[in-house]
Amino acid sequence: MRKLVLTEFMTLDGIVEDPHKWSFPYWNDDVSAFKTAELLASDAMLLGRVTYEGFAASWPNRDNSDDFTRRMNTYPKHVASRSLKGDLEWNNSHVIEGDLAKGVVALKEQAGQDIVVHGSPTLARSLMKEGLIDEYHLLVYPVVLGSGKRLFAEALPKDSLKLAESKQLGDTVVALTYVPAK
């Protein structure tokens, strides 16, 4: 069974909203290597509508000469949305029809590599409630915003996650990998 991996850029105070507004000054070779390894370990994306629309407005306009961009633009993108219907414009994008949990379980049962969820905090919280996330990649940045969307808007049950790995990326970002404690 494939793993569902949630990846988030997060501030010290837990904000995951609009990382393009605060994470870029901290981008470095280690963050790039981490994100590249994450992408190469997956062969599909699962996105919420808002993240999908942001990505679809940006990625297709980028130069496909590098492997990262080419992969983002070509591999399957599954979108959890009640408002998007029919054919989506970004190459190889599909709306998950019907029950989200059943659709995600069906994706996980297919042969293949990991399925990565970028951002999409509303979708992420729905997936957490259903116990569908197999691994959490939280890249914590030295930023405090005070307000904004939080990944953990509701408390998880005590001892529900276990730290699997932590590593420093450059001299400012920390990558924390958690798995369900089960």
Image (cartoon, rainbow, N blue to C red):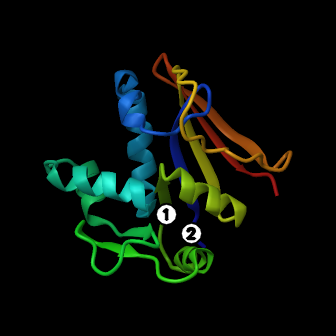
Q: Quadrant of residue 72?
A: bottom left
* 79 relative position to 132: left or right: left
Residue 124 location in percent, x, y?
A: 58, 56
Q: Give me the disc on residue 86.
A: none
Please name the residue shown 45% across and 49% down the image: 38
Residue type for callout 2: Arg
Closer to the camera, 107 or 67?
107
> How far apart, in angstroms, are the residues tagged by discs 2 and 1?
7 Å
Residue 5 visible in the shown view: no
Residue 50 location in percent, x, y?
A: 40, 55
Please name the residue shown 32% across and 66% down the image: 75
Closer to the camera, 126 or 32?
126
Element under disc 2? loop
Q: Are marks 2 and 1 in contact (CB under 8 Å)?
A: yes
First reached walking from the N terminus: tag 2 or tag 1: 2
Q: Which residue is labeled 1 in the image?
A: 115
Residue 150 location in percent, x, y?
A: 60, 40
* 10 relative position to 181: left or right: left
Q: Which residue is labeled 2 in the image?
A: 2
